[in-house]
Amino acid sequence: MNVLHVNTYDKLGAARAALNFHYAMLNSGINSKVLVLNKTIEDPNIIHYPIDLHYRIAYRLKHFVFALKTDPNYYFYNLSEAFSLISVKKALKLINFKPDVIIFHWISDFIIARDIYKFGKYTGAVMYWCGLDMAPLTGGCHYAWECKGYQKDCNFCPAILTDKQKNRAFKNLKKKIKYLSDSKISFIAPTSSLEEQAKLSSLFSSKNVIKIFLSIDNNIFKPANRNDVRKILNIPLNKKIILIGSLDIEEKRKGFSYLSKALHHLNEVIDKITREEVLLLVIGEKRGDIHTVLPFETLFMGRINDDAKLAMIYQASDLYVCSSIEDAGPMMINEAIMCGTPVVAFDNGVAKDLVHSFETGYRAILKDYKDMAFGIKEILLTSDKNYKNYKVNCSNLVSSKLSRNNNIKKLIQNIEKQQK
């Protein structure tokens, strides 16, 4: 079986998800390649679509002609479905094999619906679009928030602030429906939320929708002795460690304001001895004096590009806290649970599937910072026996839902079904 993955980048979160699928397939004996617009990794199986003069002119023209003023909270990146920037025939020549299966991942600023249609027409491949956010379902938004426009026609899009261009999302979605309705393409939903949204969408409601959790290497992301890992990372052994992701005050959907309030509330409801034991471990760079607004000692680990080190950070932590209030994932929840680290998160995204209160962590009421603080306190102060139960429950969840091999087998079974 020949499989082609298509993604705009080969690095950062969405690219990691795409490459994880790719490497899992290679490990399963499948001939797999990845087509990207921006290549940084030296790997012969990752094929670069060259940015030639034609592309540069077309890219700039597209952004000039179709420029929009948009609300940044919606991540409206798909400016126009009428303007293709690539040659599909050229792309297929570059990969130098005929794919039986094509999986599109995060393809903004690279591939449009007409290109997807052509990939299918020229190859006859079974095609999938993996929803790493809501972009495959909408006329331009990556996160729809409370908007249900994608279920109908995306007209009068709330993300578009330019009054005369309010129908741009409508036009985009109309184009996508035109080309995808004539394509044999299925939707891969990594969460129950995206699965439900896909089934309600005007694009995929009549298509095959399959739920498959993101493929993550369980040979790397697995439980380990907490103290042994802390010694390697030079992290204090006597601290209660709360792991959090990059602290971005500006990014509304990441919910920093709720995280800050939850931590301050936690600071008020625990005793002084416990308060002095708490250490906030942050994946990401230190930005300005952001640490001064947090009530606990804070250690910044910097940007982590190595999965082995990232896994060790999860293994060293007592719990991981995700404060996202609008998310298709994040993948960090999957990774933490695979390392046996309980998770406290708001009730959205993949937390609905993986964070079970008092079992694998605590799922707080959306935007309720006091409920989030309650969950953090519950896990921090629980007995050793109960904490071991959390870790066992995480391991059981990995076996039943997050096994990389099982997820790839499920996808292969679906591919074989679609090929009949």
Image (spheres, rainbow, N blue to C red):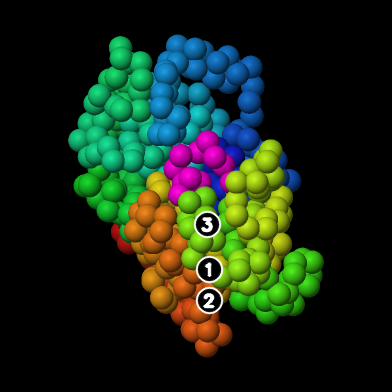
Residue 370, picture quadrant: bottom left
Q: Is residue 13 visible?
A: yes
Which mark is drawn over residue 263?
A: 3
Q: Is residue 118 visible?
A: no
- Label 3 residue SS: helix
Q: Are marks 1 and 2 in contact (CB under 8 Å)?
A: yes
Tell me the amino acid under the disc marked 2: Leu
- Out of 330 and 117, give the one closest to the viewer: 330
Distance of mark 3 from mark 2, alpha carbons? 15 Å
- Label 1 residue SS: loop
Q: Residue at x 70, y 53 (%)?
A: 300
Q: Is residue 368 above or below residue 401?
A: above
In the picture of the structure, the residue carrying the numbered disc 1 is: 270
Tell me the amino acid under the disc marked 1: Ile
| Residue 248 lies in the magenta-colored region | yes
Please state the horizontal and vertical placement of residue 211, each as a whole percent of the image: 35, 60
Please state the horizontal and vertical placement of residue 284, each as a whole percent of the image: 66, 49
Q: Is residue 392 above or below residue 269?
A: below
User: Could you tell which of marks 3 and 2 lies nearer the N-terminus?
Assistant: 3
Which mark is drawn over residue 381?
A: 2
Distance of mark 3 from mark 1, alpha carbons? 11 Å
| Residue 14 lies in the magenta-colored region | no
Tell me the amino acid under the disc marked 3: Leu
Q: Residue at x 70, y 56 (%)?
A: 299
Q: Are marks 3 and 1 in contact (CB under 8 Å)?
A: no
**Quadrant occupied by the C terminus:** bottom left
Q: Which residues are magenta?
A: 247-259
User: Could you tell which of marks 1 and 2 lies nearer the N-terminus?
Assistant: 1
- Label 2 residue SS: loop
> Mark 3 packing: few (<14 Cα in 10 Å), some, or many (20+)?
many
